[in-house]
Image (spheres, rainbow, N blue to C red):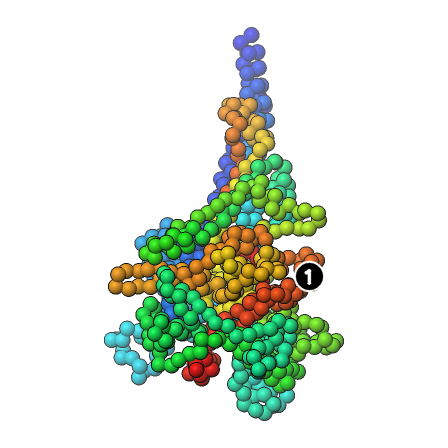
Amino acid sequence: MKLEHLIVIFVIIILPISLILTSYVQNQVTTLQLQTSYDSKLTTATHDALKAFQLNTVNSSTSDLANSKMRDIEASVNTFFNSVATNFNMAGYNQDVLKYYVPALVYTMYDGFYIYSPFTNTLSPDDYIEGTSTYQNGEKVSGLKPYIFYSCRYIKGSDTDVVITYSLDNYITVQGTVKGQTVFRYGYLLDNVGNYNSSNNTITYRGITIGEETLTEYIGQNEQATYVKVNGVKYYLDSDGSWYSLLNGEKLPQGTTYNTINDSGVRYYREAKEFTQWVQDNLGDLRTSDAVFEDGEKTKQFQNEEGTSVTQTLTEREQWGDMLIFSRQDDTGNTGKSIEDPNSNFNQHRLQVIRYSIEKNLSIAIANYNKYDEGITTNFQMPELKEDEWEKILNNVSIISFLQGLSIGGKIYNGYSIVTNTKTEEVVNTDSIYIVTSDGQYHRATDLDLVGASNITGAYFNVDFERKSVTTDTGVTYYYPHKETGCYTSIVNQSNVEDLNSDKSTQNQYGNSIYAYIANKGGTLAQYYFTALGRERYSMYKTNNNPELLKVNFTV
Amino acid sequence: MGDTLIVVVVIILGAIILFVFPLMTMSDNTDDITQLTVETAVTEFVDDIRTTGRLSMDKYSGLVETLSSTGNTYDIEMQVQVLDENPGKKTTQAEATKIGENVYYTMYTSQILDTINPSSGVTKTLALKEGDIFSVSVKNTNTTLSQQLKSFLYSVTGNDTYVIGAEHGGIVTANGSGN
């Protein structure tokens, strides 16, 4: 055979192979590029939704209330869909089309969460008229499903059967029968609280004295007012001596006269001490293994991976381990951990319950979604979230979004995104207290410059440093309740802060606990920080509170 | 005489088609696959930083290792745009009807590396906050085999050409120094 023939045969064989290979690899590259760009766009859309939620809640005086909150969430959902439509070049498509690709949106809140997903509308025949009502019975609609609490049921012996609702901090609600008594108690769990001194209304926490204070903030560009915050509402003292609250910029006169001296901080520690004592006396022997399924069943049958059926308790199924939940002591004696420390049994179990609650309801919502798709043939699956992502969800108010079913060349896109909300009145985190110094700046509490500083003048909730707007006849005006600007080394960038998350040996002495860190540093920093943390937690809105009873404590 | 010339030409052509052409296709393929690896590595790195708000030497070394495992050398450019809300706040305080603009100031690769370089055995992290923007761009600096062959055949090479490159960036969604 001639060389020419060899070459021709070679080219005939190699050319198609190389062409196919090149286009295959090119396809893979495009798919990957699309996937990463979709991931980014989804995060952007989720971030937009969160910003909308943040903006609406920070500027609304009623955002704590359930129906107002749901309205804000629905507005945020609309923002999400609009953002998805524009980012994904699907402008013009509305929510009705896009919702086929979004099996669920999760809004995690202080003591529970909302899921936005399709459901079957169920109406009783008395509530609607066939054919004329806006919504029909059995109709498939997309919307917010009822609020789901982070709760778990425990049965111990024959006389204790309680549901404990956890929250993003150390606040719990206990409902049910404890030692034969019907109870409904709620409060904060806190160790290390010292004795209350009734003569000057002070209490100690980790050796730091917490006392009364008088609070002022700006309520417009230049007007300052003394205020008291009760159950999420601030009451301001007017120049004529009367009190009023602000409802979206409008003054609402109050008939009552409040005390300008505020002891919310002291009350937080006092009540927490009492409640913690009660929990330890009555539920101190409660173990994670006492947890039962929602319907009260101790064990259920499950299929394991080999296909054989096994009988497991909730604790075994979720691998929670067996530990005392509320006791200061573990089985080997005292561990030296306080209940509020991040690594305490209580906090570990709290995170387990929250995670179980979200995971279970979310996977049901996504699995059910397959029943609702019309025209979309994707089989929706719950993606597996990573440990560090759970970490974020379990400690912050956040939005989790899912987007599935879009074709990206070689495969079908299945992505999710988690964005946390750090500027919210929903929860007072340990890092949402900012410290104000006399040089007109606010600092993160872990700012190293604050250690031993003598110029600290106050500590406030981070939301109070955000811009607020008031609409009047002349237009919209903006103001900041606290005019201080952010410190460049702890707020703008964080180059000079103690890093409690790091595993450095110097930080391990605090066990990642900001409580231990602040107490160790002591001084005015600790005093202002602990007082502000207590005050803000005590005065935030909670559904369990009875505002009328609470107000009595703050009136003259 | 004419036949001999044709045979020589055919042998040269044959050599090119039999050796250089497959070599070029294969090296092109290698570059494509390298591109895939680089893009994945960069995206994962950036998204990790964006969702945790923490940049450490460990994470950076991880990226460098993955990149160098492809057998090429790369130029890694990082950029952090730090959000500064203070100027905006001051504008609003001066005039109540105005929303001030937020300002970003930028940190580049060498400054970022200075911040995260461990000093005297202590590891350091660069903590970012919600609203900051982090981006990374990676280009190859060596000449890959496919580039060499191409420049040998139709010399289009210049100093700036690169065949493997990836860029990714976005808003940071978590506070790095949270507690």
Q: Residue furthest right?
A: A332
Q: Which residue, as the protein is rendered here, is positioned at the far top?
A: B1
Query: Looking at the image, which residue is at 50% across and 44% down?
Result: B106
Left/right of residue B91 with respect to residue B11 in the rendered view: left
Residue A245 in which image quadrant:
bottom left
Residue A255 percent across, percent down from the top left: 35, 81
Q: Is residue A51 visible?
A: yes
Q: Residue furthest bottom?
A: A180
Please name the residue shown 71% across and 73% down the image: A335
Q: Secondary structure at mark 1?
A: helix
Identified at 56% across, 31% down, the residue is: B146
Q: Position of residue A244 (x, y in %)?
A: 36, 74
Report the quarter where the C terminus of chain B lies: bottom right
Q: Nearer the viewer, residue B69 or B100?
A: B100
Where, quadrant-wise, is the N terminus of chain B in this rendering?
top right
Q: Quadrant of residue A334?
A: bottom right
Q: Residue at x 70, y 77 (%)?
A: A329
Within 10 Å of disc 1 (Cα), the crowding (few <14, some 14-19, many 20+) is few
Q: Is residue A202 left or right of residue A505?
A: left
Can you say whether A198 is above or below A169 in the image?
Answer: below
Position of B165 compared to A74: left or right?
right
Identify the residue under disc 1. Answer: A508
Q: Nearer the viewer, residue A297 or A424?
A: A424
Kindly tell me whether residue A4 is visible in this rendering: no
Which amino acid lies under the numbered mark 1 shown in the image of this protein? Asn
Quarter holding residue A468: bottom left
| Image location (x, y in percent) of residue B42 | 55, 45
Front position in the image: B124 or A8: B124
Chain name for mark 1: A
